[in-house]
Image: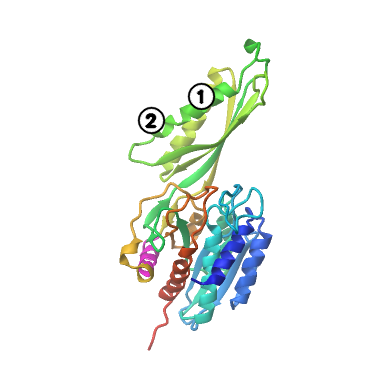
Amino acid sequence: MDDEIVAWRRDLHANPELGYELPRTAAFVADKLRGSGCDDVAEGVGRSGVVGVVRGRSRSSGRVIGLRADMDALPIHEATGLSYASTVDGRMHACGHDGHTAMLLGAAKRLAETRNFDGTAVLIFQPAEEGQAGAKAMCDDGLMTRWGIEKVFALHNEPGLAVGHFATRTGPFGAAVASFRITVDGRAAHAASPQTGVDALLPAANILIALQTIVARNVHPLKSGVISFGSFQGGQPGGTFVRSSEMRGLARWFEPEVRDTMQRRIIDIAEGIASSYGASATVVFRALYPVVVNHPAETALAAEVARAVMGLDAVDPDHPQLMGSEDFAFMLEQRPGNIALLGNGQTAGLHDPAYDFNDAAIPYGVTYWTRLVEAAMPILTQ
């Protein structure tokens, strides 16, 4: 294992930044890319993304592929107790983006040293993957056309998958996701005079429970959908009925008809239950990320390279679909490509305060990225 790359990863872990506000992280990445011998480095792409370019020993093919890593952390209080734990209260790398970034930096260094390919490798370091669509921002800023990217690839670590193992699939792989917010408005009153008010918490609680029937009773049993809640807020301790309450959640799906069903039923149920209590409900439903769709030829290439790096038995080319979402989907809408999973071992799950990226996975990721570039753009001998 390259101790330097591990040190980079742990430095990133100790200094997490959120969303698009990545001044230290982006500067760190740009500095390491320049120090590794990248031919070009651009900053501020899609607000705070960084792009590095490594040109091969030959460029007669004219081929260009993109490799993407995400850089942002999460607003979570870390509970690992590690020596390199987050130094910023309420922020942590709980999804492994520190590891993704470090592996791609390691690959950039190796590619710049060897240049054993015919074409150009574009190294994409993306902000704001966690719910703010940084991939779309980079695409909207001309990522694909500015660098002439023809194909694009990504890796994401996977807790529960053994270190040194690799998984992917052709076609829909990760679910689309939308956020929704339900505001229930009632009428404040003293709790001793319930007849004079409308307690907004009571209909809201019933709405939360009733929405769990949508997937069970309105979605086809052979199709996938998930409705989950992340917050329920309203009122203060005391003797007063709550005038207003709010719930926030996420809906996930693969098929558009499932999305349409969930959106319609969320609105119908919320409005109907609120009205039955004499309250009113307002629903805001906002699409976030589309379905992650891997392309056949690029997925076959990714699996082939992974077998060469990790061994035949360590690669699952037909992994089950995931209900998790990824904004790499926006890049896959613009160019053919693949996203795959790299084993993180038996660790805490993603977005868990006890999660940590497994440094033992780093050599596999760096070697995979390097071999992928060489396989996608081989130097042909005469």
**Which sits in the foreground, 206 or 138?**
206
The vertical placement of 80 against 53, above or below, is above
Residue, disc 1? 206
The vertical placement of 139 against 42, above or below, is above
The x, y position of residue 156, in whole percent, is: 47, 58
- State how far apart marks 2 and 1 are (Cα): 17 Å
Find numbered disc 1 in the image and state the secondary structure of the residue it sits on.
Answer: helix
Residue 315: image quadrant is bottom left
The x, y position of residue 233, in whole percent, is: 61, 31
Left or right relative to 381: residue 202: right
Q: Residue at x 66, y 49 (%)?
A: 89
Looking at the rendered structure, which numbered label has been put on residue 217? Answer: 2
Do labels 2 and 1 touch, CB within 8 Å? no
| Amino acid under disc 2 | Arg
Residue 301 part of the magenta segment: yes
| Amino acid under disc 1 | Asn
Q: Residue at x 54, y 41 (%)?
A: 179
Find numbered disc 2 in the image and state the secondary structure of the residue it sits on.
Answer: helix
Q: Magenta-highlighted stretch: main secondary structure?
A: helix
Find the magenta span and give its range: 295-306
Residue 364 part of the magenta segment: no
